[in-house]
Amino acid sequence: MIDFVYRFFTFLLGILGAAAALGINIFYSASTRFQSVVGAHPDASHGWLGLGCAILAFIASFLLLFRVSIPAGALLLIIAGIGFFFVVNWWAWLASPAMFLAAFFGLYQYLVHRRAEAAQQGRPARQEYPPPEGRTPAVG
């Protein structure tokens, strides 16, 4: 139960970062369009790339909900967070940290869960070859 709650909160953090990226991308694209209408020469706006990064972050956030797809979701969140910097420059500092934190917490939870599963399964007993002189083999 606690495992699902943790994954759900990482999902919400990823969705928050994706929603912020979408909002920032819309604002940034609208401002560059407005600047070009009034005769200014704005920087090139990569509206479709920003939208793609936001959609990628949404998809990655949903992948964090399922235990088997956590590494893929975390990787996609990192790619979306870094890619968003190329689209909106320093404005990405408002959205990308949430994506990076969701990826970090998702991977952390995944690795802790994998370690706990390995401990529950136990490790095979290690035998000493050859046994020490005059003694029986050590049992793990």
Image (spheres, rainbow, N blue to C red):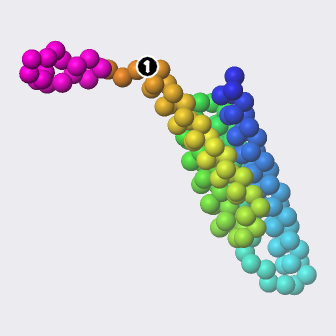
The quadrant in which residue 138 appears is: top left
Q: Is residue 86 above or below residue 114?
A: below
User: Is residue 28 in sight in this rendering?
Assistant: yes
- Which residue is drawn at the image coordinates 74% and 78% (left, top)? 43
Q: Position of residue 50 (x, y in %)?
A: 72, 60
Left or right, 91 with respect to 134, comes to right
Q: Position of residue 99 (x, y in %)?
A: 68, 51
Tag 1, which secondary structure? helix
> What span is in magenta?
125-140
Give the amino acid type for the residue marked by disc 1 in the picture.
Gln
- Which residue is drawn at the image coordinates 67% and 65% (left, top)? 85
Q: Quadrant of the N terminus?
A: top right
Q: Is residue 129 above or below residue 100?
A: above
Q: Residue furthest left?
A: 133
Q: Quadrant of the C terminus?
A: top left
Q: Position of residue 98 (x, y in %)?
A: 72, 52
- Which residue is drawn at the image coordinates 69% and 37% (left, top)? 62
User: Is residue 52 in sight in this rendering?
Assistant: no
Q: Position of residue 73 (x, y in %)?
A: 60, 42
The one nearer the camera, 22 or 112, is: 112
- Which residue is drawn at the image coordinates 72% and 70% (left, top)? 90
